[in-house]
Image (tube, grey):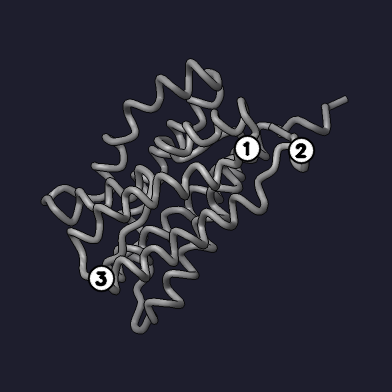
Amino acid sequence: MTDPKTHSLIEDAQGILFGTFMASFGVLILTHLGFVTGQTAGLAIILSYATNWSFSAWFFIVNLPFYWLGYKRIGLRFMIKTFIAVALVTVITPILPMFISFENLNPIVGAILFGFCTGAALMALFRHGASLGGIGILALYIQEKTGFRAGWTQLLFDAALFSVAFGLRDFMTVVYSFLGALVVNLVIAINHRKDRYIAT
């Protein structure tokens, strides 16, 4: 009999596909509005605005140093799933604009929608033993070891990144961006608890 606490391969596959698709949709909203965000995705966004390289290229590159931590601290299975998730976002993100565009998107609504979509994406990935790399790996490791919520760790990192963003983007763009990042991290902090959801 299958252990009800363990996800099947098909369940993992759909969870990771859902998570990466929703994350890519979140990036589409973000870049359409010219926003920034936190974590490694935020770093990749800022670098893409400052260079001729795409978000996808930077996102893949900035995550590379964190795979070793994921492997050493959390395990090979987690690292492989995370690598797959990052690779899928890298592929899906530049494809979505071919099929989706926004005629009118209010920045406040867009920020909240980005937050909900990305929060749901990260929840799905976390619950299926993956992340989108970078600070997500570090946040999950800290949560596993200390019980300090992953969302709060990410929120602290985001605060530092947004301090830098104020020197690169206009004030209101950063304010709207922070709203989106706040929603993402609140979704994770409130909903992602190991004692409530233990399947892996």
Q: How far apart are labels 2 and 1 at the CA level?
A: 15 Å
How far from the left and from the top, in percent, is residue 9?
65, 32
User: According to the image, label 2 marks what residue?
Assistant: 195
Q: Hey, what amino acid is under mark 3?
A: Phe
In the orientation shown, which residue stands out farthest toward the top? Answer: 72
In the picture, residue 146 is in which quadrant? top right
Q: Are marks 3 and 1 in contact (CB under 8 Å)?
A: no
Name the element at disc 1: loop
How far from the left and from the top, in percent, is residue 41?
35, 47
Name above or below for residue 77 compared with residue 176: above
Q: Give me the disc on residue 45.
A: none
Name above or below for residue 160 compared with residue 172: above
Q: How far apart are labels 3 and 1 at the CA level?
A: 37 Å
Q: Residues within 10 Å of mark 1 (few under 14, many from 20)?
A: many
Residue nearest the observer in this picture, 26 or 174: 174
Residue nearest the observer in this picture, 89 or 121: 121
Q: Are marks 2 and 3 in contact (CB under 8 Å)?
A: no
Q: Is residue 133 left or right of residue 44?
A: right
The quadrant the N terminus occupies is top right
In the orientation shown, which residue stands out farthest toward the right? Answer: 1
User: According to the image, label 3 marks what residue?
Assistant: 171
User: According to the image, label 1 marks what residue?
Assistant: 128
Name the element at disc 3: helix
Q: Earlier in the sequence, mark 2 or mark 3?
A: 3
